[in-house]
Amino acid sequence: MDRKKLLLIATGGTIASRETEEGLSPQLGSEELLQCIPEVRAVCRVDTVQPFNLDSTNMRPEHWLVLAEMIREQYDGYDGFVITHGTDTMAYAAAVLYYLIQNSPKPVVLTGSQVSIFARDTDARENLRGAIQYAADDGACGVHLVFDNKVICANRARKTRTRSFNAFSSVDYPEVAYLRGGKVRYYIRESCPGPVRFYRRLDSRVLVIKLIPGMDPGIFDYAAGHASAVIIESFGVGGVPYYDNDEFSDKIGRLLEKHVKVIVTTQVPHEGSDMELYQVGLRIKRRYELLEAYTMTTEAVIAKVEWALGCAETDEEFRRLFLTPVGNDRL
């Protein structure tokens, strides 16, 4: 059997960094990364490309659209794709690509590292090798993040540690697989029969407002002029303060009147929202038929909202797209 043919897309990040007088900065190219793990040549054939060389703090939706378009253009020529990316915004990148590239029979895999690939004690070589091994496996499909030998569904990944090698967790969904001894061991056998669907538009005018006790509801007046959608990270399972008046509720109503989309999620990392449990949530959800994110991560909510805004021409179409499950996003 012919070896799989993969495309390695390098974008910078810690994995490609060297020390400079101003701190770590991406310096290495895609071929240099690949040369650090020559053993993968026995597993598959790998071509490389380098569209960016950025710290992931500087990555944004425009860059992720370029990555999706690059994969679309090269899709027929490769069996899978591996993207190296800085870890700080990799969960956002993974979630965005999850919505831009849907139902792909071919794997799209993101990875990176906490330490540069040229450091002696690094997780970079293992992570990159694992991502390539997973992308070359016959059972791999869809968009995933591979880190610390774990395969995580792209819309469930969250960076939960700033320094440790086990930096990413799968939130409220099992890890798909793990890597051991050069083999992929599956917990979940996924099915992506195709045809793949690519999307080419995002609207990044999305504002996340994290509620804190005593917050002035006037913050929503700013949102009305600067955002296409507002995601409210509420307390607990989901609620909006009423204090001594309905000012919070009225401000949200005015956002909706101006066709600013409002979605409620929770700032609690696990187990999701349920606005119908308490009066502070049920009251406002019923009043405005508010959209709710349930167990989606904040990164996934942002990504799905940006994608749905890019696709929808009306409020009703946006609502339909947001409420329609894409894979496992509404479990």
Image (cartoon, grey):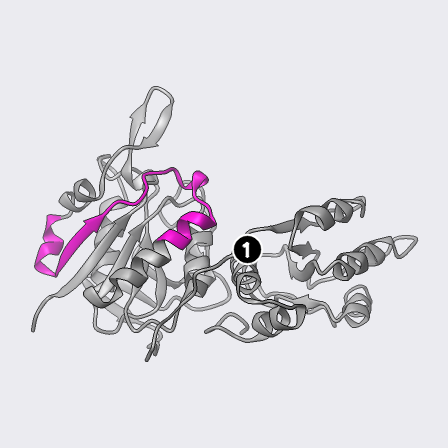
Element marked by disc 1? loop
Q: Residue at x 21, y 73 (%)?
A: 138
Q: Is residue 53 magenta?
A: yes
In screen coordinates, is 110 left or right of 207? left
Name the residue tied to disc 1: 203
* Residue 66 % position (x, y): 37, 52
Amino acid type at circle 1 is: Asp
Residue 147 visible in the current orientation: no
Looking at the image, is 271 positioned above or below residue 90?
Answer: below
Q: Nearer the viewer, residue 75 or 236?
A: 75
Part of the protein shown in magenta = 38-66
- In the figure, 142 relative to 17: above or below? below
User: Could you say which quadrant of the image residue 32 lies in?
Assistant: top left
Residue 101: percent from left, percent from top: 39, 65
Up/down of 198 relative to 260, above or below:
below
Q: Quadrant of the N terminus?
A: bottom left
Q: Residues within 10 Å of mark 1 (few under 14, many from 20)?
A: some
Q: Residue furthest right?
A: 244
Q: Which residue of the protein is positioned furthest toward the front in this rendering?
A: 313
In the image, residue 295 lies in the stretch drawn in magenta? no
Quadrant assignment, res 114: top left
With respect to residue 271, does 243 lie above or below? above
Task: Tell me the quarter of the picture where residue 104 sits.
Answer: bottom left
Residue 284 visible to the viewer: yes
Using residue 130 as the reference point, say whether residue 173 is left or right of it: right
User: In this image, 68 relative to 18: left or right?
Assistant: right
Image coords of residue 303 (percent x, y): 51, 58
- Across and down, in percent, residue 261 comes to 68, 61
> Number of callouts in the render?
1
